[in-house]
Image (cartoon, helix red, strand yellow):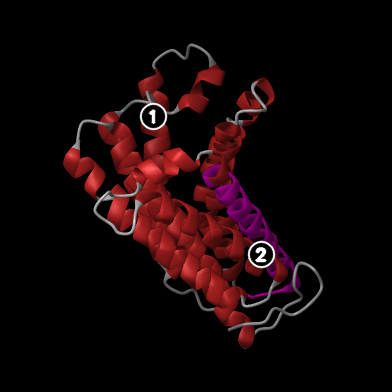
Amino acid sequence: MRLQFGRHIYGLGAIAFGLITLTWHSFNNWHQIIILGNIPHPEDLAYIAGAVELLGGIAIQWEKTARLGSLTLGAVFFIFALLWVPLIFKTPLIYDRWGNFFEQFSLVSGALIVYAMAGPAYSKREAKIARLGYLFFGICVISFTLQQIFYLSGTANFVPKWIPPGQMFWAVTTTIAFILASIAILSGHSALLASRLLTFMIIGFGLLIWIPAPIADPHELINWAGNAENMAIAGSAWIVADFLSQQKNNPVKWPFGKTPVLK
């Protein structure tokens, strides 16, 4: 199957992750790393992780190396997701732990779809991998919804105050949008339209919230890392839309055994 544009955005997010990690050479804000205990020379681990993200993000930009790049990025983001699991077991009632796991896992989902689509032949095996990545991403969108519901006030505080009619209005509106997107993606009804609108919304988060953040305070690592993560998640959503757009010409069995309504 022909690869489309989503992987480029996804790869740019990974490159940004790599450059930020190599520049800051620190895991100070990566709270999931504390589960590893006191690591001797943690900056070496930061250099390795940053280099892998950088190289994977570059590799995924070209069709000949896209599969290798997606495999590399999928592996590193899966490791980052797994590092949240012990913290989830330790404090299961704090949803932020779950939310961080699914944010990382959404990047694994995008990598799975690219890996399948970049294969030399789109066989039944690749179709299963792509459907699995698609299903995983739909589940992650449910988590995005829950995270905004549980932390609605915090979500509202992210909204720029100058946008009418108000911060809480947009917090509630985007939460509803996440709910509708998850239903559409997992049910297959209007899934293509939903994935495109979801991509547009996440890109909007980047333009209105995350890009201005390091301009306002360039000394906070989270302001830079938030940009990279938002871009990578937007790339994953775009990859889902690319995958769906190709199902018109390459129909495959849907995760729940029915053909999606592609609009």
Residue 62 place in picture, x, y as percent: 40, 66
- Which quadrant would the N terminus be assigned to in this image? bottom right
**Residue visible at 68% across and 60% down in the picture:** 135
Lateral position of residue 235 relative to residue 121, left or right: left
Nearer the observer: mark 1 or 2; the answer is 2
Q: Which amino acid does label 2 sit on?
A: Ile
Lateral position of residue 99 relative to residue 124, left or right: left
Q: Is residue 80 something that shows in the picture?
A: yes
As displayed, is residue 263 above or below residue 123?
below
SS label for mark 2: helix
In this picture, which residue range is highlighted in magenta? Answer: 121-148
Magenta residue check for 169: no
Q: Mark 2 points at which residue?
A: 183
**Residue visible at 39% across and 64% down in the picture:** 8
Residue 188 place in picture, x, y as percent: 69, 73
Residue 165 place in picture, x, y as percent: 33, 59
Q: Which one is nearer the viewer's eye here, 219 or 52?
A: 219
| Predominant SS of the magenta segment | helix
Magenta residue check for 138: yes
Farthest residue to the bottom: give it.
249
Q: What residue type is labelled 1?
A: Ala
As displayed, is residue 46 above or below residue 213?
above
Q: Name the residue under label 1.
A: 46
Residue 104 place in picture, x, y as percent: 53, 44
